Amino acid sequence: MTKPRQYRAWDTKWKRWIKPEDICVYGDGTADFVRRAENGDKIEIVELKSGEIVLEEGTGLKDKNGKAIFEGDIVRGQYSPRDGDDWAYEVSWEDEYKGYFVDTDCVIEFAKRENEIEVIGTIHTDNGDLSNDSN
């Protein structure tokens, strides 16, 4: 039995997350989502169109706080507990290697440090800024 895939979606028009229960991904790769008003009322069912929604898949891993890790997340960890230097990288899918990567580490190596890494933001929000070190 295979584990069900997890998805999340960023609405580029409204600059907000779409709730997972409002996303329907079909076997052929197409998707629909429910666009809602601020009060939660359903406005319309919308076909996923390129550029309007960024669909991101879960890696199947969790960070040290138990938070699910998705592609597009910014994760932070340490190179070595002794040196104290922090790193922060985007989690991304690499087609060439058919896997998730954090910088140059594949998801298998990444998984070994699962209890040492922490999700600090996403590429869509300003709390995951890669331009400054988190020391």
Image (cartoon, rainbow, N blue to C red):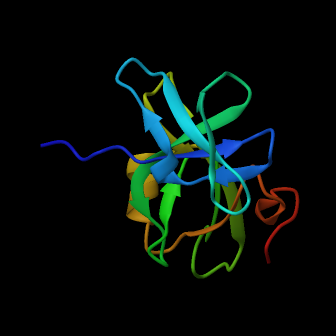
Q: Is residue 26 above or below residue 119?
A: above
Residue 77 in percent (x, y) is at 61, 69
Is there any visible trace of residue 103 in the rendered image? no
Is there any visible trace of residue 81 in the rendered image? yes
Q: Quadrant of residue 117?
A: bottom right
Q: Quadrant of the N terminus?
A: top left
Q: Is residue 49 above or below residue 9?
A: above
Residue shown at 73% from the left, 30% from the top = 52
Residue shown at 80% from the left, 56% from the top = 130
Total labels: the figure holds 0
Residue nearest the observer in this picture, 88 or 39: 39
Q: Quadrant of residue 66?
A: bottom left
Residue 38 in percent (x, y) is at 74, 59
Residue shown at 58% from the left, 73% from the top = 80
Residue shown at 73% from the left, 53% from the top = 16
Residue 123 in percent (x, y) is at 74, 50
Q: Residue furthest left?
A: 1
Q: Quadrant of the C terminus?
A: bottom right
Residue nearest the observer in this picture, 43 or 95: 43
Residue 24 in percent (x, y) is at 44, 37
Q: Residue furthest top?
A: 28
